[in-house]
Image: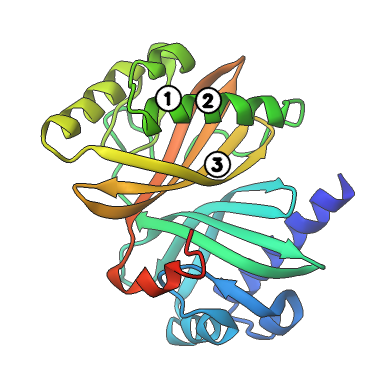
């Protein structure tokens, strides 16, 4: 527990100092000199992150959730910058030797509430401390492999919380029937969400974040999906799905995912 609290404090402080306070001294205090950034918004390394902060003086970050799992810390929140459309999504940091050494993120434009009135960020905020993270990770991974990688959408019926399944995607209402219908319609149009593999998971309490890759209509995409487990069933989903920029091809060789 002390190590978990230390990592949570380290990453949340560093992220706040860099992205809201624009304190670039934090880059020297909290980030490794060999820091790798896989974000499509940042040129690799400390210099790229410094440039992002320098070029966006009005940028602010508004946190919603923090998950800690081993050496990974995931943030779920919202970025604002003057009159630009806010961006909502996930940041994943890897920590080693007391310093931030690596970062991935998936951000999408903020949208209006969905048909069920849910936003991309609302819902339960803190991980439930009495949950078995490994059991929840195993449940979500088994579901993910069957429903999304294998494309068997009936798995939503077997693993999820029926019509009480809470959906935060802007395009889909609550309930497993709505999400199955949405995915099947995309498949019929030739725009199915294809998933190839999970690259990492961040499990904390009742939350499990999956970071995976795949394609939509032949275009490579990164998927960030946060699942909440309740009583052995998947009860809630938040997501951020974004195309991988063409100029990120070279970055992939060092592991953009």
**Can I make out residue 127 in this image?**
yes
Contact (Cβ within 8 Å) of mark 2 with mark 1: yes
Q: On the rendered structure, is 224 left or right of 202?
A: left
Q: Could you say whether the residue bearing mark 3 is in a helix, strand or loop?
A: strand
Q: Specify whether 131 is left or right of 104.
A: right
Q: Are marks 3 and 2 in contact (CB under 8 Å)?
A: no
Callouts 1 and 3 close, C-beta under 8 Å: no
- Residue 246, compared with residue 124, is above or below; it is below
Instruction: State the image quarter where residue 149 is shown.
Output: top left
**Residue 29 horizontal/vertical position (percent):** 76, 80
Mark 1 → mark 3, Cα distance in angstroms: 17 Å
What residue is pinned by disc 3? 209
The answer for how far apart the CA atoms under marks 2 and 1 are is: 6 Å
Q: Nearer the viewer, mark 3 or mark 2?
A: 2
Give the residue number, with chain letter if any, for mark 2. Answer: 142
Q: Residue furthest left?
A: 189
Image quarter (top left, top right, bottom left or bottom right) of the N terminus: top right
Which label sits on residue 146? 1
Instruction: Give the mark nearer the N terminus: 1 vs 3.
Output: 1
Question: x%, y% of residue 245?
Answer: 31, 67
Q: For this rendering, which residue is in front, 204 or 257?
A: 257
Q: Residue at x 51, y 33 (%)?
A: 227
Q: Residues within 10 Å of mark 3 (few under 14, many from 20)?
A: many
Residue visible at 39% across and 25% down in the picture: 147
Label 1: which secondary element: helix
């Amino acid at each position: 527990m002390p190590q978990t609290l230390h990592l949570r404090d380290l990453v949340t402080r560093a992220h706040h100092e860099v992205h809201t306070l624009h304190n670039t001294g934090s880059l020297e205090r909290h980030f490794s000199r060999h820091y790798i950034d896989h974000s499509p918004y940042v040129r690799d390394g400390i210099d790229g992150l410094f440039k992002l902060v320098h070029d966006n003086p009005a940028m602010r970050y508004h946190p919603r959730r923090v998950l800690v799992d081993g050496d990974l810390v995931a943030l779920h929140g919202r970025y604002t910058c003057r009159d630009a459309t806010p961006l909502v999504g996930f940041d994943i940091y890897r920590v080693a030797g007391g310093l931030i050494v690596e970062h991935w993120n998936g951000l999408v434009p903020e949208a209006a509430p969905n048909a069920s009135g849910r936003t991309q960020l609302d819902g339960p905020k803190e991980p439930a401390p009495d949950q078995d993270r490994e059991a929840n990770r195993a449940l979500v991974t088994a579901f993910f492999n069957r429903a999304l990688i294998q494309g068997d959408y009936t798995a939503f019926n077997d693993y999820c919380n029926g019509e009480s399944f809470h959906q935060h995607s802007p395009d889909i209402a609550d309930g497993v029937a709505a999400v199955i219908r949405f995915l099947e319609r995309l498949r019929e149009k030739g725009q199915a969400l294809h998933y190839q593999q999970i690259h990492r998971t961040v499990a904390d309490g009742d939350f499990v974040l999956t970071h995976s890759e795949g394609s939509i209509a032949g275009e490579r995409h990164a998927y960030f999906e946060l699942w909440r487990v309740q009583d052995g069933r998947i009860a809630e989903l938040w997501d951020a799905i974004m195309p991988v920029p063409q100029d990120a091809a070279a970055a992939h060789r060092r592991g953009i995912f």
